[in-house]
Structures are given as structure tokens and as C-alpha cells.
Amino acid sequence: MTFSTRRNFLAVTASTAAALSLTDLVRGKTPITGAPRPSFKTRFAVNVEMWWGGVPFMERVRNTHAAGFPAIEFWPHQGKPLDELAAYCSETGLEVAQFTAWGFSPGLNDAANHDQFVRATEEALQVATKLRCRKMTVVAGNDRKGVSQREMHDQVIAGLKRAAPLAEAAKVMLILEPMNIRKDHKGHCLYGSTDALRICREVNSPMVKINWDLYHMQISEGDLCRRLGEGFDQLGYAQVADNPGRNEPGTGEVHYARVLRALHELGYHDYVGLECSPLDGEDKAIERLRIVDTW
């Protein structure tokens, strides 16, 4: 361990020991309104589908705020207690960074589904307005038998062009997420940054950009910092998880201190989604985040 690394580690350890434990916070021993803010440079948004597992949705939301994070993200809005969430966010200042407006199926890569996609976008925009949320994820869809990747991507472009004016009017960004097909989403039609960049540049809307999930990008193409720079004009949102394992940064091969610094230096200062599963519990995940965020 180098001197600088040891100094950073000791500083993180001291700050963690001085603070109340996360367990005390989430069990109500400290009022939520008095929860200390984590000492992060990066504005992290906790994915409450993957953190605080095994408890009801709103308890996960409250745990996130109690831990000191400024924002959450989640997957489909259907079935969520939206009125309760909106009231809680208004009361506490917690923000919803993004949620999923359109998932894997039916595929956006099929023109037959575009009318449904437009209706779903209209509905999701109403949810975004209720939650004061500025971004919503859309997914391209899985491969269609007998249809080329280029043809599928062209249909994604056509569908997004139909929805773009709605997003622009509402001032809510549609963020298209490329997946990875090596590990998690075999058969998905969109992976890596190259095709996602072509799609978003052809749609040519300030409210249609990329949900740049760095976990998927690491598996699909690597060279994370250079590719972020090359595609920065189309970066709408960033998500992180380490590889292998899809656990929190600091558990795998990605040098996230370098990547987070690159994001900041490029000019991205918005929320970074923690779409990852805590490897050894949320307390330990927060400790690891502090270490990788000390660039």
C-alpha cells in the first residue's frame, strides 16, 4: 500500500468511525432529517431495486435517505406507491434521478409496437411530472428472428423520433440503455456505445440521450474513459457497477476512481446510478464507495 493510498484509507476509516452506523440510522435511532450526508464528490443515486433487499419499496426509499444519499432510481413505475413516494420526496428533498419507462418487451425495435411505446411514454411522463423526475430509461428490445441488427436499430430510431417531441415538451429526457450480451442479456439487440451513439445522433433531440451503464460498457467494449469522451455529447445519465459480479465499485476490475474523475472532468455533474448489488451489505458498500470516490 502506498503512502497516499494508506493516507486515503485512514481518512476514510476515521470518518466512518466518527459517524453513526448506517444500522442505527435505518432502525430509527437517529431522525431521518438529521442523517449525515455521505462525503462523496459524486452525486450517487441508489437503485432501490438492488439495495436494501427483502423489505417493502418505501422502506428501501427511507433507508436510502437515512443513509444520506440524495437520490434514488428504480425500474418500472407500475405497481409502485407513487403518491406516497411523491409526498416523501417533497417532504425530505430526496430526488428520483430516473426510472424505467419502457422495458425489454415488447421491443422498441419493431414498428408494430411504436403506438404502444408512444402511449407508454405519455403515461410515464405523467409519472415523471408527479415525481419531479427529469429522466426515464427506455430499452431497445431483444433480437427479432430474420431481422438484421441495422434494421432493428432503425426501428428504434423511428420510435424515439415519435416520442422525442413529447419528451421535449415535458422537459424529461429519454435515456436509451445499451446492455451487454456476454453475461446478462444474451440476445439483446443493442450493446456497446457505437450503435447507441448512432441511434441518438440520428434522433437528434436534446431529450433523447444514452443511459451509459459502465458495467455493461466494460463487458461489451472496455476503454471506458476514452469512449466516454468520444460520446460525451450523447451522455444523458451514468450508472455504475463493478465487474465481475455487478457489485458496488471497489469489488472488481474497474478502476472507478479514474472513471468517476473522468466523468467529472468531462463535465458530467449529474446523478450517477448505483445499479449494483452490495456484496457484503449496504454499510460495507458505502465504505467502498467512499474509497473509490477519493480522486
Image (tube, grey):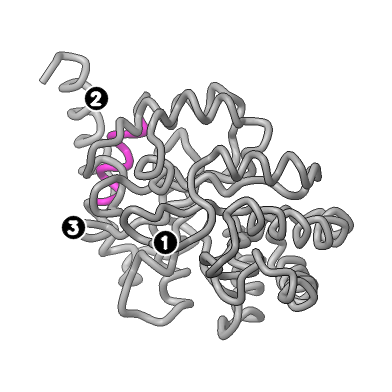
Q: Quadrant of residue 252?
A: top left
The local crowd at label 3, few if under 14, some if 14 to 19, many if 20 or more residues have their Cα within 10 Å, is: few
Report helix, strand or loop for mark 3.
loop
**CB-based contact (under 8 Å), mark 1 and mark 3:** no
Q: Is residue 290 magenta?
A: yes
Mark 3 → mark 2, Cα distance in angstroms: 21 Å
Q: Earlier in the sequence, mark 3 or mark 2?
A: 2
* 277 versus 39 height, above or below: below
The local crowd at label 1, few if under 14, some if 14 to 19, many if 20 or more residues have their Cα within 10 Å, is: many
Magenta stretch? Answer: 285-293
**Coordinates of residue 7 in the picture (x, y in percent):** 20, 20
| Three-letter residue code for mark 1 | Ala
Along the horizontal axis of the image, is 109 left or right of 24? right
Along the horizontal axis of the image, is 95 left or right of 186? right
Provide the residue designation for mark 1: 66
**Coordinates of residue 206 in the picture (x, y in percent):** 79, 43
Q: Which residue is rendered at x = 31% and y = 56% of the image? A: 183
Q: Which residue is rendered at x = 59% and y = 32% of the image? A: 268
Q: Which residue is rendered at x = 61% and y = 70% of the image? A: 107
Residue found at the far front of this picture? 146
* 26 versus 190 height, above or below: below
Query: How many numbered marks appear?
Result: 3
Image quarter of the C terminus: top left
| Three-letter residue code for mark 2 | Asn
Provide the residue designation for mark 3: 280
Mark 1 → mark 3, Cα distance in angstroms: 19 Å
Q: Earlier in the sequence, mark 2 or mark 1?
A: 2
Provide the residue designation for mark 2: 8
Query: Which of the two discs, 2 and 1, sits closer to the camera?
Result: 2
Residue found at the far bottom of this picture? 79
**Coordinates of residue 69 in the picture (x, y in percent):** 46, 52
**Coordinates of residue 192 in the picture (x, y in percent):** 49, 43
